[in-house]
Image: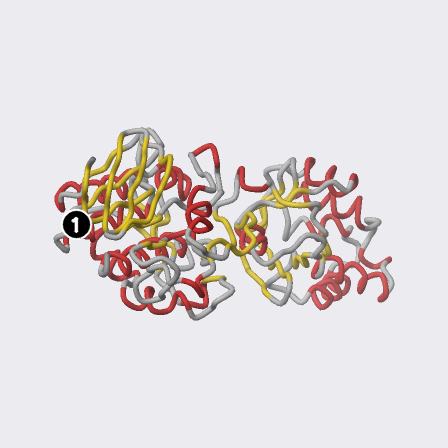
Amino acid sequence: MHSTDVIILGAGAAGLMCAQLSARSGRRVLLLDHANKPGKKILMSGGGRCNFTNLYTEPANFLSHNAHFCKSALARYTQWDFIELVCKHGVAYHEKKLGQLFCDNKASDILDMLLAECDEAGAEIRMHTSIEQIEKTESGYLLQTSGGQFACQSLVIATGGLSIPTLGATGFGYQVARQFGHTLLPTRAGLVPFTITEPQLKAMCTELSGTSLDCTASCNGTSFRENLLFTHRGLSGPAILQISSFWEAGDTVEINLLPDRDALSWLQQMQAERANAELKTVLGEVFTRKLANLLAEQWFESKPMKQYTPAELAQIAEKLANWQVVPAGTEGYRTAEVTLGGVDTREVSSKTMESLKSPGLYFIGEVLDVTGHLGGFNFQWAWASANAAAQFV
């Protein structure tokens, strides 16, 4: 039997971060994962460039049934701390927009950095290792695995959520939480595209597949100003991914296609200045020609601006500024960037990430009911929660 101080389950962002930090504090650390390679989600994140943190990270960027839980960890390991680590390794990066930091080169720079830190600190990583059974012992935990039997004082669950199962995501962390008496809050896909089944709208999305535009998407009192992308399945793009975390089945999503304009005032101005121009021509100056033509043909009757009555202009303005969409659903965990819900944080210490139900058991990263907005916030939660646990394991 192999005995060590700390065993971490999950070789993703949170697990790798916790492994190197725990090892640096003098603990003997073993990281186990069932996959063939570490950090798969890191490698595919940010379009292959890894949006590793956000300059404007604060607790308001996170969703949880326990809104105060994330504050302590985020305050003790900030975006600046991770940026310092990135700079130490000479990883070139840039701000894309809205505080989002990406690698100049590729996401493997962040993974290589974490693996180098683990190696330097003496943390051992074993892949291809499935966990078959976990038992609580007097001195900690005993694990039966496909690679033998392991004992530890502290057990850290960094197995992530259910998003993108093709990269190895499973519900294993939730099983462990349930085994040791934890409450699980309902899980669902977050930061995920919407699917559309209503025939006319679906036809429109298919026709416009690949078209992107700036908009404001709103649902349940929350709004995001970002790009919307039409797809052959429905609606995607950053604005949609963001608002999807606030959407529940059956809810209406309101989309302002003219976020920089007062739609009615603009249309009235166009009518006064360009009375003979057709609506589709006017719309073509703010949208792609394809989108403008489709809107003019399917939503409105395109005719010269001078022919619209005040009431008709008001109707057009309302549709453009307050497009009401009721998605059929989402694309689910297959393409979701994160999992909403998870281990109830009211049963976990916000200071140490230790279970309040089973001493020596820790939960970090996505397995917890803490979900960041799009833009590097979920990685920052991985780094911060890993740091919090590493100080106490």
Tell me: residue 155, above or below residue 47.
Answer: below
x, y (%) of residue 376? 39, 53
Q: Out of 87 and 128, give the one closest to the viewer.
A: 128
In the rendered image, residue 69, in percent from the top left (x then y), is placed at 41, 67
Q: Secondary structure at mark 1?
A: helix
Q: Is residue 365 visible?
A: yes
For image coordinates 48% across by 36% down, the residue present is 165
Residue nearest the viewer, comparing 289 with 213: 213
Q: Is residue 261 left or right of residue 166?
A: right
Image quarter where the N terminus lies is top left
The front one of 57 and 279 is 57
Question: Which one is nearer the viewer's eye here, 297 or 372?
Answer: 372
The residue drawn where x is 33% and y is 60% is 354
Q: Residue at x 80, y 65 (%)?
A: 314
Amino acid at dot 1: Ala
- Residue at numbered disc 1: 23
Please state if 281 lies on the left or on the right of 362 as rendered. Answer: right
Location of residue 379 in the rendering, given as x and y in whole percent from the top left corner:
36, 52
